[in-house]
Amino acid sequence: MSEYSVLIKKTEKFILVNYFLEGVLSVLDPKQDINLLPPNITYSALGKHIRENLSKSREIDFDELRAIMSLDSDDTFLKSLEQKIKEEFSYKNKKEIYKNMDFLSVSIMNNIIIITPWHQDSLDGYTAIEDENRKWVRFEYPIDISDEELGKVVMEGFKYCTSIYKKK
């Protein structure tokens, strides 16, 4: 059962799509490019960007995971990401970056696209959102939906994101 996944972070100023390398743990590839997309990106362009990142997500073995963990042991990738965001959008600190951020993942599992909105429980941390039956809130779509439809359902999925920093 292969899984490919991306994490999408969205604020009023940008959208960021990062892909995971999947092993015993899921880790962000520290070598990936940092592309900050405009929040008013078209559905089609967003869907295309998500698919491109999903295609870079891949399974890794334990040795590669260990090499990545030692390569990025001090979170160099996240620090450089945060620095780029601070410079580009004039944020003063980490809290300003994350306090109004929504988190959502897009995964491909068993040839189904799964969109999972997340609850922000710390600045750069998130957990599952549960429905009234204590099941994770997630949405499934056929793998062959168009880029435009993928972008649209992702943007709609952000409406389900919650945060300890935002009032309802």
Image (cartoon, grey):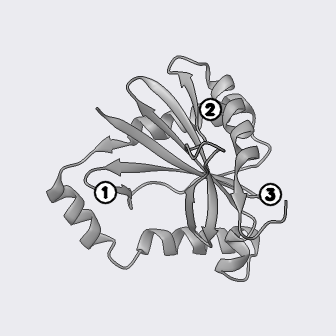
x, y percent for residue 21: 34, 50
Using the image, determine if residue 101 lies above or below residue 118. below
Front tag of 1 and 2: 1
Q: Which mark is residue 47?
A: 2
Give the quarter of the figure containing the C terminus: bottom right
The residue under label 3 is 12
Give the quarter of the figure containing the N terminus: top left
The residue under label 1 is 25
Q: Amino acid at mark 1?
A: Leu
x, y percent for residue 61: 18, 50
Which class describes the residues within 10 Å of circle 2: few (<14), some (14-19), or many (20+)? many
Which class describes the residues within 10 Å of circle 3: few (<14), some (14-19), or many (20+)? few
Q: Amino acid at mark 3?
A: Glu
Q: Of label 1 and label 2, which has the lower sequence position? A: 1
Residue placed most toward the observer, 90 or 98: 98
Q: Quadrant of residue 152?
A: top right
Q: Is residue 131 left or right of residue 125?
A: right
The local secondary structure at tag 1 comes to loop
